[in-house]
């Protein structure tokens, strides 16, 4: 009887903890981590993927800190009023509204952000 219980316990252990075919392994949330290119979610009028990446780097530089101190969500860039949110990764995750630097593209007609105010409206 003891041998049978021990055998069943071993079989269950192998089934639960054995290396399977890879299903369920990796990220605990079950979602695959995709390769995310910096600037990928920016609108197409910003330019090529490389130009979008450079756009994001300029925004990081405008946060006035080291890159690992801040993060920018590409969906929290408000082109219509030339602002974006810079989140300082401290204990409180402090969000700061910053202006997109002067001269950076803000609309589909390649309009650029002025020193003050909203992005110029695109031509009809």
Image (tube, rainbow, N blue to C red):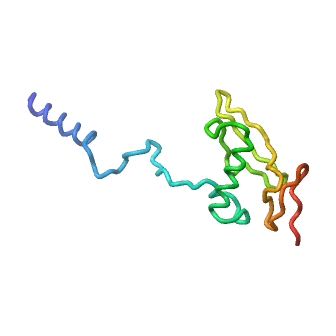
| Left or right, 92 with reference to 123 | left
| Left or right, 123 with reference to 42 | right
Q: Name the quadrant of the N terminus.
A: top left
The residue drawn where x is 69% and y is 36% is 65
| Left or right, 30 with reference to 118 | left
Q: Which residue ends up furthest to the bottom in the rendered image?
A: 124
On the image, the x and y values in percent for residue 110 come to 80, 65
Q: Is residue 124 above or below residue 114?
A: below
On the image, the x and y values in percent for residue 88 come to 68, 35
Image quadrant assignment for residue 69? top right
Q: Is residue 116 above or below residue 120?
A: above
Image quadrant assignment for residue 61? top right
On the image, the x and y values in percent for residue 3 come to 8, 31
Q: Which residue ends up furthest to the right in the rendered image?
A: 117
The residue drawn where x is 70% and y is 55% is 55
User: Relative to the observer, which residue lies in front, 53 or 16?
Assistant: 53
User: Relative to the observer, which residue lies in front, 78 or 16?
Assistant: 78
| Left or right, 79 with reference to 43 | right
Total labels drawn? 0
Q: Name the quadrant of the C terminus.
A: bottom right
User: Relative to the observer, which residue lies in front, 31 or 112?
Assistant: 112
On the image, the x and y values in percent for residue 19 come to 26, 45
The residue drawn where x is 91% and y is 50% is 117
The residue drawn where x is 82% and y is 68% is 109
């Amino acid at each position: 009887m003891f041998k049978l219980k021990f055998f069943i316990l071993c079989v269950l252990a192998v089934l639960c903890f054995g290396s399977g075919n890879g299903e369920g392994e990796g990220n605990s949330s079950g979602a695959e981590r995709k390769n995310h290119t910096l600037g990928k979610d920016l609108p197409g009028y910003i330019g090529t993927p490389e130009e979008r990446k450079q756009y994001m780097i300029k925004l990081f530089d405008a946060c006035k800190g080291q890159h690992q101190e801040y993060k920018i969500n590409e969906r929290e860039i408000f082109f219509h009023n030339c602002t974006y949110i810079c989140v300082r990764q401290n204990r409180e995750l402090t969000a700061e509204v910053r202006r997109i630097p002067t001269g950076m593209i803000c609309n589909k007609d390649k309009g650029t952000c002025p020193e003050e105010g909203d992005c110029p409206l695109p031509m009809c």
